[in-house]
Amino acid sequence: MLLSKYLQFTAALITAYIMLLLPPALAQFQPRPGFDAISEQDCGLTLSGKVLDHDSRATLIGATVSIPQLHQASIADEYGNYHFHHLCQGTYTLQVTYVGYEPEKFTLRLTTSSEKDLALHASPQTLSTVEVSGSRLQEQAQSSQTLAGRELEETRGLSLAESLKRIPGVSSIQTGPTISKPVIHGMHSNRVLLLNNGVRQEGQQWGSEHAPEIDPFVATEMKVIKGAAGVRYGADAIGGVVIVEPKALPAAPGVGGEVNLLGSTNNRQFAASATADGNSAKIPPLSWRLQGTVKKAGNVRTPDYYLQNTAFREQNFSGALGYKKEKFGGEVFYSQFNTKLGILRASHIGNLSDLKYAIERGKPAGADTVRFTYGIGRPYQQVQHDLLKVKAYLQTGEAGRLEFIYGWQRNRREEYDLHNVASGNPALYLNLNTHTTETVWAHKPLGNFSGSVGVSTIYQQNTYKYSAFLPYYTAVTAGAFAIEKWRKDRLQLEAGLRYDYKHLKVMQFDTSGTLQKPTFDFNNVSGTLGALYDVGYHLTLGLSATSAWRAPSVNELFSNGVHHSAATYELGDLNLSSEQAYNFEASLNYFGNAQLNGQLSLYYNVINNYIYLSPLPEPILTVRGAFPAFGYRQTDATFKGIDLSLAYNLLPNLTIDSKTAIVRARNTAAEDHLINIPADRFDNSLRYEFGQAEEGSRFSGAYISLGGTYVARQTRLPTKTDEDFAPAPDAYFLLQAGAGATVHLGRQPVEFGITGNNLLNSAYRDYLNRFRYFSEEAGRLLLFRIKVPLDFSKS
């Protein structure tokens, strides 16, 4: 019944959207009286012009200009001229590429024979690692950055959150050395949406010590959209969106792959990940991929002692099968993520007196006697996450493209505490099943307009065992959105609107043993307005105003008991209402320059009814001891800050990179600061690339780098509303270095790399690490990487 209504709703919405767009589309082909459509259409038009350097206006001989709609291409001649003949009236996209320059796209409406010069921006080396998405203009007015290429390769072996910290404005919140999750502009967990291979990641992400169940080895790029992005991705994307994209399935016949091997000091981690993919020569549309990863690490060492029970293990695998034709196709993807994470034994205190003593002691009790081991004892987490994705697309004639994605996820979380060891059972078992669908229709460009309309649904069911920390619940969410963009010459305008409805049904027993079945309904509208302007001379300006909203999650409403992996007692609040966020951002992007490139964004985020977890003054006594207590509160808040990234070529092969992230958050209702907000962060590094090796050389792509990270002390702490258990730790500086090269062993390239972190073996504590109360952070670490690309198609 639900599926039938969903299909009817989808069909009705798409039909209405097509009807809105159909009149202007037909008007373009409306014949004049006395003429039929064929005689009216002029197909003898010519398009020509020059391909030029944007700054020097020099002609670019040999540049390629293509029109993908017609599968035609032209090569610029010795004078930089390109030509197309026998073109019909209509709107075309010109794609221009030239070695050493950024690829560009130009949209042109052709009514008569025309001349149009095409200017390209020089592509410096610095843009080969971190790329700002988009060609001539960004895809959206909101700032976004992509981690890809060599910079992504250098993070292999790190968690998803630790990898993303290379992007300004992104930090991480940690629970010891084994658990971390991304923080964007001071927000995390349910306010940051993770998109894993096109499917929104749905697990028990509400906990600050619940890490994302995503294998970073699957990704060939990670894109971060900062700020509220609720219209396209979901109303709850208040803080931003992390898009994890795998490499596209191969389109050329053959079999290839790669093997990654990693080893690190400190926790003596070793990891191996292998990928194999191929395309069938007999059935060219058919492609496949298989991938697997294993990791194992032991106790982490600070500069002075080992941290007991901080080992972890991980085993993941995935497979994909795709069938791609020009007008239709599909893909099936399945992955399973398995991890067992030890939790620092000293973090399970049990009462405030012991917590105070642990803080005063400065290091865990008995730390001097702890030795290295790969063993994992209580307390620990064991998590398995399954993901099944089915995708299909269809070209709807000349009107546009229809895409449908179905996702099924099962998240099984087991948390083991220090008690009930004899039974072998976990203290808490949660099983969350999620079914998601998304249907999107993107219409073809109509004049200067392009856009899409879509509907999405989420169906969730959560069950538990051993502890009623969270109740049984069923949640149904449905949403519909429409986005349109208008682009002409240097200016792009965009607008979008989305409506979401969420129904929550809960089943739990009250104190008298009576089964209660409360229900909740939430609904609201999200919107976006944006403008991008290409000033020229490598400069783009962006302005955006977006809104998003988030219904309170089940844990915020119903938590009542010991959260075992956090060793805290948490209390929900049934009176919580939905959060409403309004995000404003101005960005400046200076790109494509041979010497200086950078991006600056200023943001101001207003969140009404902001929900957060606040420490309570008194512990709560249970049969297992007295636990520090936390309760969910609601207030009005503001988040504002600056993200800045700069890259400057000091010499042809020597580049300095500088990244700055500053965020300020206020509890406006109490005129106080908010708790657990990232401190100011500054990253600076020097990188020298040895340039192109001579032909026949056994070495290529060699580089060395040296840098440092400075994190200031967080001095903006709440004094009126919330009281932390300990003062914020001091500022700290970490020295880093790296080197790498590709060695050619005959016809087989092998990539080698080494990265060093905290090379001075500094003792420090991070404000956003919950274990800062008990221990220092990890000491010196060296990470060794080997990557072997494979191509079995070579003779």
Image (cartoon, rainbow, N blue to C red):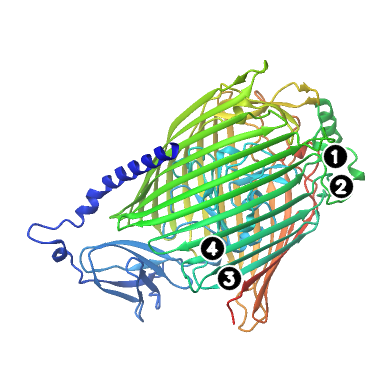
Q: Secondary structure at mark 3?
A: loop
Q: Position of residue 104 (x, y in %)?
A: 41, 64
3 or 4: tag closer to the N-terminus: 4
Disc 2 to disc 4, how far (Cα)? 41 Å
Please indicate whether residue 790 sits to the left or right of residue 106 in the image.
right
Are discs 1 and 2 less than 8 Å apart at CB?
yes
Q: Give the residue at x 43% y 43%.
A: 544
With respect to residue 760, does 169 lie above or below?
Answer: above
Can you tell which of label 1 and label 3 is closer to the viewer? 1
Q: Which residue is mark 1?
A: 363
Q: Quadrant of the N terminus?
A: top left
The kind of residue on which mark 2 rests is Tyr
Residues packed near mark 4 inside 10 Å, few (<14), some (14 to 19) or many (20 plus): some
Mark 1 → mark 3, Cα distance in angstroms:
48 Å
Considering only order in the chain, which callout, 3 or 2, is on the residue closer to the N terminus? 2
Mark 3 and mark 4: Cα distance apart in space = 14 Å
- Tag 4, which secondary structure? helix
Q: Amino acid under label 3?
A: Pro
Which numbered disc covers residue 652?
A: 3
- What type is the residue that disc 4 sits on? Leu
Numbered label attached to residue 127: 4
Is the C-beta separation of discs 2 and 4 under 8 Å?
A: no
The residue located at (84%, 44%) in the rendering is: 308
Q: Residue furthest right?
A: 369
